[in-house]
Each structure stands twice: as C-alpha cells, then as structure tokens.
Amino acid sequence: MAKISFDDYCNNIEGLSNDEKFEIILKDICCQDLPIFYGIVEKRKSAYSEHINYFITNVCKIHSHMQIKYPYKNKDEFVDVFFRNHIKLAEGEKVFFSANLGRLNTPNELLEVYRIFKFSDVLGKDNYTEADFNYENLRNIISKFNPLKMNLLTNVENRLNNYKIISDHLSEEIENKSKILKQLNEDAQSIFDILNKLEEKSEVVHQNFIEAYPEAKRLINKKSAIKLNSVGFKNVKKSLKYNYEDYKIELFISALNTTQIIALCGKPGSGKTTFAEQMASAVGACFHLIEVQNNWTDSTDLLGFYNPTNNTYQSVKFLEALLMAKTDFEINGEDAKLHLICLDEMNLSRVEYYFATFLSLLQRDEEKRLITLLPRDVEVAARIDGNEKLLRYAEFLLPPNVRFVGTMNIDDTAQFLSPKVIDRSIFIEFDGENIPDENKNYVADKFYIPYTEFSKKGINVDSCIEEINKISSVTPRLAKYIKTMWAIYKKIADNDVNYFTDNIILGKILPALENVIDANNLQLFTNSKARYERGLNSKYRFDENVWSFWE
C-alpha cells in the first residue's frame, strides 16, 4: 500500500472495531494467513520516567524471513513491537512471538506482543540460519502459538495421505471394472452405515438433553404441536386448572407475541406466580422461576461473571435458563418450545438496574441481540485450548424462543418502577378479591404451541390507535406493541376491536398515566373506565390533578 503518516493511518481505521483494525494491519503487512514473527529484544528508557520499555526490532515473518515494514512510514523503517515483560528477557535476546492490536498511541505501538517464546525454547539454540526454518521446525513453531492451526495442518496432511493411498489403490484396480464397481458398492454401504449411526447418535443426544433438564421431559414431541387459533385457544383454556377471567388469558397470550415484560401486579398472595406458571403449562412452554433478591444492582445478578483467578465462569439460575432455551432452539429450530423466564417479585430491586441489559437488547432486531459473557481474549484462548467448560459461556444471541414475565407486589416493601420499565411492560392486575374457582373441564395438556406461533408480524388496527390517541400520545414503540398483539388477539378471541382497545388501555395506558384525563374518552371501554374511577376515589390520592395506577 502507499505509505502515509501514522496519524493519517490511524484516522483511516478510526471507528472500526479492534478486530477489524487488527485484520487490516495484518493484511497491510502481508501476515494475515500466518501472523507469527521473530525478532530481537531491545530495551529503551521511557521519555517520561525511569521506566524501561521493551520492544522487538528487526521483526521478520517466519514463513518468508522478510523484514516487516511500517505501513504508514515515508521511509523504509523496520517495525518495533511493544510488549510488557511477560518473561525474563535479556537485551539482544532472539524471540518468536505472536501479536495483538497495539494501543496506537505512538508509531511504535502498532502491534503488541500476545505470546512470546525464546529461540532456545523452540529451536534448542540461540543463533539461527534460514536453514533452521525447515518444515519440521515450522511445525514446532506453529504448534507453540496456535495448536488449532497445527491440528488443521495435521488433518490436511492426513487427508492428503489418504487421498494418495486411494489414488494408488484405484490405479491398481483400474483395469478390472467389476472390482471397482464392487468397491463402490461397499463404499456406498459404508456411507449408509454411517448415516444410520448418525441418526442413532442424534437420538442419544436428544435423550441426553432431556435427562440433563428434567423439567423439559415434554420437550420436543412434534406430533403434539398445535397452531395458535380459536381452536388452539380453547385447548389452552381447558389446560388451565383455574377459571381465570378471559381478558387476562387473552392479554397474556397476545403479549407473548411482543418483547414486553408481562408484569403481573397486585397484592401479595393474590395468585400472580400461580397464574404465570399455569399459563406456561397451558401453552406447553418451559417455565423458569427466578427469585429476585433485594440487593440486585446490575447484570451480574442475572448473567453471572468470569473469575480470572481460577479461569472459570460463575453461572447463575437466570443464565442457565437462557442456555437451556438456546439448546432447545439449536436442536429443534422452528419446532422449539417457548421458554418463559419469570422474575418473581421483580420490583424488590430496581428493575432498570439489574435488567438494563435486556431492556436494551429487546429493542434491537433479533440478529443483533448478542450476549457477551467472557472477555474476548479469554474466549479466544478457550477456543484454542478447547476448554469446553468455558466455551459453554461463549457469546451467543438471545434465543428467539425466550419471553420474560414478572410478578410484583404493590406494597411498601417494593421499589417503584421507572417510566422506562413501565413503557416496555404490559400489566395484568390481580386485586386478590376475584379468586378463580377450579376448572371443572380441566384436561392435562398433551400438546404444546411452538414459539414461532408467538413470532407473528403486526397487523394494523387503526381504530384502536385512534381511540388511545385521545387519552395519551401513541409512540412508535407503543404502536408496534399494539399491532403485534392484535395479530394474535384477532385469531384467538371472538371480541371486537373495542374490547381489545379496552384491554390495551387497562394494561398499557393507565399504568403509565400521571394526570387526570377526560373520562368521556373511556365511555366505550368498561373495564378501563371502572379502573380509572377506582383510582379517582383512592384514599391515597391527595392532588385532584394527579391520577396514578399505583396508588
């Protein structure tokens, strides 16, 4: 490439990720295929202190022995590679090393040493000639720095040897067509045997998955999958042990088609957690109950953390639920079950603190909901070393078959919800007075509804949005929630748009309301009107201009 100044070079790659910057630099110095180098250690006194900095000079590629040039200098100056003193090295020591992206603070910090070995530790001597870089020594060098590449190289060699054996064999048999046909038939039979073994292995893997997660014994029986429609909805209601109000069941199921937190709120002991568990069972979902603690402050309470002391990952119950959903999705794809993760007493701590990662993730497109648990260098090292225990926590996308439910008590022991959390939740209220009786038509569910039935695109429902606009401004996010809920609601319920609008006002609009409104705008909506009037008459209401769902 054309030589440019250091500042111009840094400006050209500004804005890229560190991985992208490093890839461009390796390409510019022609080392992207085999980024392993050798050179001579040099110590220099820092210009700003008495500290001694270590660099490697006269840097060469191991596969071509050409000295590497700066991609941004106007003169042919050799690369200096900065490194911290990983091992005790003397001035003039000859070393092999691999590199990471440097700090890019100064021209000689373009690259930084990642791993380093003395010549004597690799070749058995300090001095060298080009003859020492023979095939066998190159293999030793590569195996020191990248065992994965070494394995790949060995596999290629083995395959080449196998191809040679096959070629020799075919050459000997070419004159006898009958023998060749016989051999081909034998090979074909071997392939069929392999396919049969793979099928058997698949069954074993599936069974191991079931045994690893006892709560998923019903996961997956494709013959029991049903569609979510009016008939499927009747089956769901039969699978509930209690006769809950229709609007609660309809609101819950339609909200599963969104990324909202389905928040079940009310007095302690009013049956919120039981309702969540019953609804999960009725749609054939896997239910994961997570007990929120009052000292939760950040995402580590949900996702655990990496412990550098013993190079392990400390997992927690919430993360294991995500990984179970991920495994289900990877094995079963579109036939995977829904996984409901229920945050029990979610407002014991500030939701916007410990759930902040997911409040943000759920607003992104599915393919951008990336969860990163391990530091990048730790994950890379785990892949090289084949550390399966750590690789279980390698970065992954939030599984599309996960939905979040929360229960919350409205009393003095709980935290108030922030406007951000309210905006991204839908509320179903339990007053503790209308206790549901047992369902006499109850039938233990023998079916499940695949998660894809809760991943439908939104459908316009303009009349609903127009009515809600009279009460409160409809944001793009709220409009999206309404449309995606309507896509499910119209398939399962016999009620009209006004009934659907009534439930949206009750579950989405009133919980976010802060001031009194014109009650005439609620005349068509029986449930919402009754709940609004109840709030007007609350004994905790002291300002006639203020109205709150939470008083």
Image (cartoon, rainbow, N blue to C red):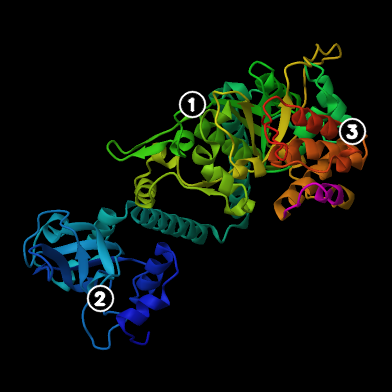
| Range drawn in magenta | 465-475
Q: Nearer the viewer, mark 3 or mark 1?
A: 1
Residue at 9% in and 58% down: 89
Amino acid type, callout 1? Gln
The residue pinned by badge 2 equals 107
Residue 64 part of the magenta-drawn span: no
Q: CA distance from mark 1 to mark 2?
A: 50 Å
Task: Determine whether label 1 and label 2 are within 8 Å by CB.
Answer: no
Comparing 287 with 416, the one in front is 416
Task: Determine whether label 3 and label 1 are within 8 Å by CB.
Answer: no
The residue pinned by badge 3 equals 230
Q: CA distance from mark 3 to mark 2?
A: 68 Å
The residue pinned by badge 1 equals 293
From this view, report whether residue 252 is shown above or below residue 16: above
Residue at 56% in and 43% down: 358
Residue 164 picture location, percent across and down:
44, 59
Residue 447 picture location, percent across and down:
77, 26
Comparing 431 with 224, the one in front is 431
Relative side of 345 to 395, left or right:
right
Q: Quadrant of residue 309?
A: top left
- Give the mark nearest the N terminus, 3 or 1: 3
Relative side of 384 to 353, left or right:
left
- Give the mark nearest the N terminus, 1 or 2: 2
Whether residue 220 is visible, yes or no, is: yes
From this view, report whether residue 151 is shown above or below residue 329: below
Relative side of 484 to 87, left or right:
right
Task: Say few, some or many: other residues with alpha carbon within 10 Å of mark 1 (under 14 / 14 to 19 / 20 or more).
Answer: some
